[in-house]
Amino acid sequence: MTALYREHALGLTRMAYVMLGDRTAAEDVVQDAFCGLYRRWEHLSSAEKALPYLRSSVLNGCRTVLRGSLRQARADHLQPVVSAESMILGQEQRREVVAALRRLPDRQREALVLRFYLDLSDAEIAGDMGISKGTVRSTLYRALAALGIALKESS
Amino acid sequence: MSISQDEFRAALRDVADDIAPDTIPPLSLPAGVIRQPRQRRLLTSLAAAVAVIAVIAASVVLADQAPSPRPSAPAGFAGLRSVPRYYLALLPTRVNGNIYPSADAVIRNTVTGATVATVRPPKPFGRFSFVAAGANDRTFILAAQEGPVGDQSNTPARLYQARFEPASRSVSLTPLPVPETPRNRWLGGFALAPNGAALAIVLEYEGPRGEFETQLRIYSLTDKSLISKVWQGHGFINGDALLGFDKPSISWGRGRTLAFTWGDDDRPANDGIWLLNAATAGGGLLADSRHAVRQRVPGGLYTFPSNAGLLTGSGKVIVDAVSRERLDSRRHYTVLSEFAEFSAATGRQLRVLWPSGAFNEWVQWSNSSGSVLVVAAPVKSGGERGQVAFGVLSGNQFVPIPRAPAAVTPWGAALAF
């Protein structure tokens, strides 16, 4: 469990942070996911199922956080901490893109993050989200369209 | 503003990089209640937990104070003769390197382990996916689905009754008078009432906001009206899709009481074993049910059932495998597991049936009083924890069932007594 945490905690925390915009909440979600895995460990089919399980748990945890109105309000007003590199790339544009992402429906936001942040395949996204590969593709299509509309509206 | 997919990808990574690699807090496993992640997202193949236990041993100290299962009994042991004479199983088969339940089902003699019949799915179905017990030890319920072995899609399932005739070793397969499951629903389990008059079916699906919804339907099998009653709930019945279908998810007691183990990510206080009054007209699943056994009980930091508590036919007791977490002075977790009996009326634990002492066990079948069980439990071999095996538990004695399929496989056992 400790080795798994060392290997994947950073990536999962970053994924949660992209979706939540709240570092503390992201860390909590990841901790909860590992605790859940610990409790369910003996039921896993194999150790290689651990990471998909963790990703699913993190996705679900992010949904729960976003559903909380207080958290939602916090997230909406959070300004991402900006790295020096990203300042070169365009701080305002990045902020708008991620803010638009966070306004999308759960499923669309999750599919986009899994595809464009984690670079997962349709099959892997389907496994993590519990939907078919066809639904993954249609969700991504709709999500990109919705993101484009949201960005146009914000500008 | 419009951006390319590459710019979008870069924006996400820029934001993610706000979390520096050396700033992640250490893993902390809290002593209190741990919220369960929704399991049903992982509708994939299943699990060899022996290796898993070996991994978790690095951070968890398994209590090993329990008496080891006594050696396997002679073939004539009365316990083996006090459970149903035949059982039906979907045996594991390997396809493209993965293990799935075989397309055919086999019927085996419980005492001898001999395969006495094979049941093949009727056309156009390509496989049996789930099984449950019938009204006696020669009848079983099977779900047939389209697609080859290894297809895990939620195609509609047609339910059949298989009747085994010992004299001729033949099996007759009859479709049950209930509709196929809808295409967009996952079949989560089914159970025939003890009198054979009603069939309960669990269907699961994702709501419009991604929430997990469960529908429990009961069909009358005694008339031709196909009238069904429907209960709805936000959460899931723990047949444990993560494990496939190797645990019974619902069970009937005397009269019209149906037990189910409930999980609800949003309201973990609802987790535990509930008893549905199936005499009601249908409606809210929890509203028409009573919370009989809660997950947390005195005696441990956290107690969780196996997700497959069984209500015995008498309706008086619930039998389950429960695990309790404790923290020792070095902040190591100790996990104690035992098969226990609970009062269906009060939810209180009545007695420990067998302090098995290890993870990964559940009750597969119970006689009417709860005095004889078929359980899955890790058996010791040469002093070491070995494979999780099915056996008969009676009077604190565990007797492995000869040639029973492994209880925990990458798919699950899919067994019905």
Image: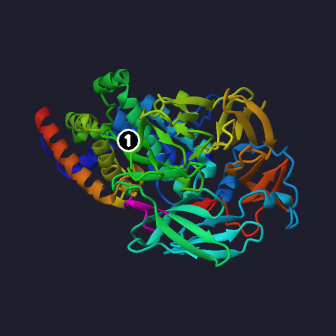
| Image-based side of B303 in relation to B401, left or right | left
Extreme residue in the front direction: B223
List x then y, in percent, for residue B106: 61, 72
List x then y, in percent, for residue B84: 71, 60
The secondary structure that dominates the magenta segment is loop
| Image-based side of A62 in relation to B7, left or right | right
Q: Is residue B152 magenta?
A: yes
Q: Magenta span covers which residues?
A: B150-160
Task: Examine the image and state in which quarter residue B400 appears.
Answer: bottom right
Task: Examine the image and state in which quarter residue B79 appears.
Answer: bottom right
Front position in the image: B100 or A33: B100
What kind of colouring is applied to the model shown?
rainbow
Q: Is residue A34 magenta?
A: no
Relative height, residue B360 to residue A20 (above, below): below
Front position in the image: B139 or B275: B139
Q: Which residue is at a point 18% across and 50% down the rendered structure image? A: B4
Task: Examine the image and state in which quarter residue B327 appears.
Answer: top right
Mark 1 residue crowding within 10 angstroms, few (<14) / some (14–19) / many (20+): many
**Could you tell me which quadrant the N terminus of chain B lies in?**
top left
Label 1: state its secondary structure.
Answer: loop
List x then y, in percent, for residue B233: 43, 36
Relative height, residue B416 to residue B277 (above, below): below
**Could you tell me which quadrant the C terminus of chain B lies in?**
bottom right
List x then y, in percent, for residue B284: 42, 32
- Per the image, the residue denoted by label 1 is B17
Could you tell me if residue B32 is visible in this image?
A: yes
What residue type is disc 1 on? Asp
| Image-based side of B10 in relation to B150, left or right | left
Front position in the image: B389 or B329: B389
Relative height, residue B134 to residue B30 (above, below): below
How many labels were placed on the picture? 1
Q: Which residue is at a point 49% across and 32% down the rendered structure image? A: A28
